[in-house]
Amino acid sequence: MTAQAGFDIAKDFHWLAVTDDRGRPLFNHRVDNTPEAIANAVTELLAIQDEHGQVAVGLDILGGIASLLTAMLLAEGLRCVHVPGLTVNRARRGTRGGENKSDPRDAKTIAEQVMLRDDLRVVDLPD
């Protein structure tokens, strides 16, 4: 079994959605862009990984406002991939109500893209 997570990145807070290997939601909630809140989210992801196996984490933005989150995820050994914003937008538009953007919907779409695609760019810490 596996699980996948999607982070919709924003300046003040991110939105995290996690689904199992069949796309069923495990949780979906806000994560403030602070070290403490991100550490709690990482702990949740590691617990999911213990129960469901490898967790792949999709991020829609790299660098800048996503730097702290990305560094903390990678430091804990979580596999991260980039799901470009345009990909999220197009995939979301194909769903019921998809023309209306929302952070929870985008996070779920990112997690779904991680589950469905094997060509997403892996994110690594710079040397």
Image (cartoon, grey):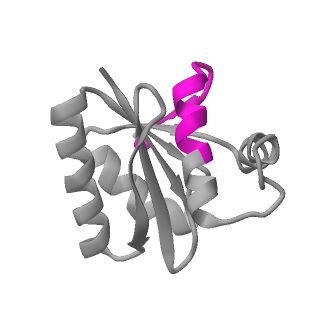
Left or right position of 104 against 26: right
Q: Looking at this view, is 72 or 50 the one in front? A: 50
Where does residue 11 sit, x and y in percent of width and height?
56, 76
Position above or below: 106 against 23: below
**Residue furthest front in the image:** 96
Q: Residue at x 52, y 28 (%)?
A: 115
Position above or below: 19 against 70: above
Q: Looking at this view, is 74 or 52 the one in front? A: 52
Q: Is residue 120 magenta?
A: yes
Q: Is residue 10 magenta?
A: no
Q: Residue at x 23, y 53 (%)?
A: 44
- Corner quadrant of residue 49: top left
Q: Looking at this view, is 96 or 2 the one in front? A: 96
Where does residue 62 sit, x and y in percent of width and height?
58, 53
- Corner quadrant of residue 80: top left
Left or right position of 93 against 27: right
Left or right position of 64 against 23: right
Q: Residue at x 52, y 41 (%)?
A: 111
Position above or below: 109 against 27: above
**Residue furthest bottom in the image:** 12
Q: Residue at x 58, y 30 (%)?
A: 121
Question: Split into 4 quadrants, where in the image is the N terminus?
Answer: top left
- Corner quadrant of residue 46: top left
In the image, which residues are magenta? 109-126
Judge whether residue 61 can be spotted in this image.
no
